[in-house]
Image (cartoon, grey):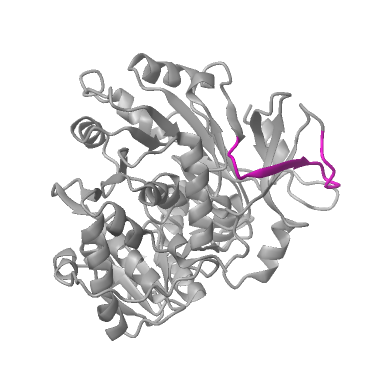
Amino acid sequence: MIHQPHCDWLAKWNLYSPDQIALKDALNNKAYTYSQCFQIANGLVPYLESLGVEEGDRVGVFAHNRIVTLFLFFALQRLGAIIVPINFRLAPSETDFVLSDSGCKLLFFDPDFEELMGKLKTAVKKIEMHELKLKSLEAMQSNDIYPFKGQFDKPCKILYTSGTTGFPKGVVLTPKILFWNAINTSLSLNLQSSDVTVNFSPFFHTGGWNVLLTPFLHQGGTVVLLPKFDADKVLEICENENVTIFFGVPTTLGMMARSEKFSSTDLSKIRYAIVGGEPMSLNMIRLWHDKGVSIRQGFGLTECGPNCFSLSEKDAEEKIGSIGRPNFYVETRIVNEENQDVDYGQVGELLLKGPMCMTEYWQNPESTKNSFYDGWFRTGDLVKKDENNYFYVVGRKKEMFISGGENVYPAEVEKVISRHPEVTEVAVLGVEDPQWGEVGKAFIVPKRDKKVETEELIAFCKEHLAKYKIPKQFEFLDDLPKGDSGKILKKNLIATQI
């Protein structure tokens, strides 16, 4: 068994650098040292125990990016319990599924969502709900140290991802996965305890937790938290807080570049910006380079890190479109349909292996089994690599598309739209969009002699889907193209979009 200090990072930094700033609230300009974070985490333990939280329990969190969520995560780890961040963009029925599937004992919610909680209670199966109040939790700061019950190979977090079969899947993350992702990140980015970043990526997303936040906490760096993205505010924070490493998706960096403040903001302290989610255009890369900010592209997924590949800033323009090379402790294969390795330049499915990979989806043995081949995780991404080991994503085997940095699975959207009483058939695919990168387009076959309006379908989707999953375009057809087996031929629909 791996020695426990690998898990209890706060205890280590409380010993080594107690006065180093760990977290800073960008809204109220309040900072918390590693020592204060450690004391608050310990002080929360008896409070959580009074609510009945025990080792192995799941605790849901429905909140914007708040420091209090991190305090809760630290405390739950001390109890050996599991945090389940909930996507607050989900429809009530989707939220109910996540809470039910994970078996959450409690749900903590952000005061910002108090009104929504009232509506949610009518859709969610009975569960005890508690408001996340920062001031009351700060008051629980304690010098008492409680035993750390979290174990290296035991779950500490479940992040739900959209499912290829229409149901979200819970990715089980352990301290081991967080540790090795942090090691890969530190080696790739040369992280230092003096580094500062701003984090606005939502905590229900692996980008919010594991691209920079947990690697920074492992390294003893400083994270400035912003509840949600605001281009002008982020630029202001980058200058005032001397941010050294920045993470965003092309959509957010594009919004920042279009801000009136972009030209006047001093970004000279940023060593480089990390871009993930989707490729960044050459024009946008050059715009940031002209600003003096180097761009590093990365690639990964919730199940494996997510920091699996990195394209160094020196290659950003010459290797445009590449996700870079595998990070240090990441093993890769590219295989064909027969699971045979392909040659350089040939397209195949990307398989990953390494200590940063998950081993299971929460209570979903079938999906877990289907996601692995001989110990290798099947990403569903179609890639190729050149002779210098630079990888390129050329497609997605699972039909997923990315809208504004969020993964959208057509099967999940189709499952909802097909329930509309006036819809006979539906097919959804991603199409290019100047603002969001990609958006959903739904091809609808209405029931015979029936007419359904776009506005009606959008309203129906709003009841059951997160906003970013709702198609932005609709096209009505008499029939969908099908093969001899009756399977819908989406490639024929794609051809009509070119």
Q: For residue 333: magenta?
A: yes
483 w.r.t. 260: above or below? below
Q: Residue 207: where, in percent of width, then height?
A: 44, 47
Between 222 and 309, the residue placed more toward the observer is: 222
Q: Residue 27: where, in percent of width, then height?
A: 16, 47
Quadrant showing the N terminus: bottom right
Q: Is residue 230 left or right of residue 140?
A: right
Q: For residue 213: magenta?
A: no
The residue lying at 42 percent from left, 66 percent from top is 84
Between 35 and 47, the residue placed more toward the observer is: 35
Q: Is residue 476 visible?
A: yes
Between 134 and 407, the residue placed more toward the observer is: 134
Q: Residue 464: where, in percent of width, then height?
A: 45, 62
Q: Residue 2: where, in percent of width, then height?
A: 54, 65
116 w.r.t. 392: above or below? below
The residue lying at 38 percent from left, 47 percent from top is 219
Outermost top residue: 290
Q: State whether the magenta stretch is mostly helix, strand or loop.
A: loop
Q: Is residue 325 left or right of residue 312?
A: right
Count all numbered tags in the image, as a single digit: 0
Quadrant showing the C terminus: top right
Q: Is residue 406 left or right of residue 252?
A: right
Q: Is residue 64 visible?
A: no
The residue lying at 32 percent from left, 17 percent from top is 291
Outermost front residue: 16
| Segment colored magenta | 326-342
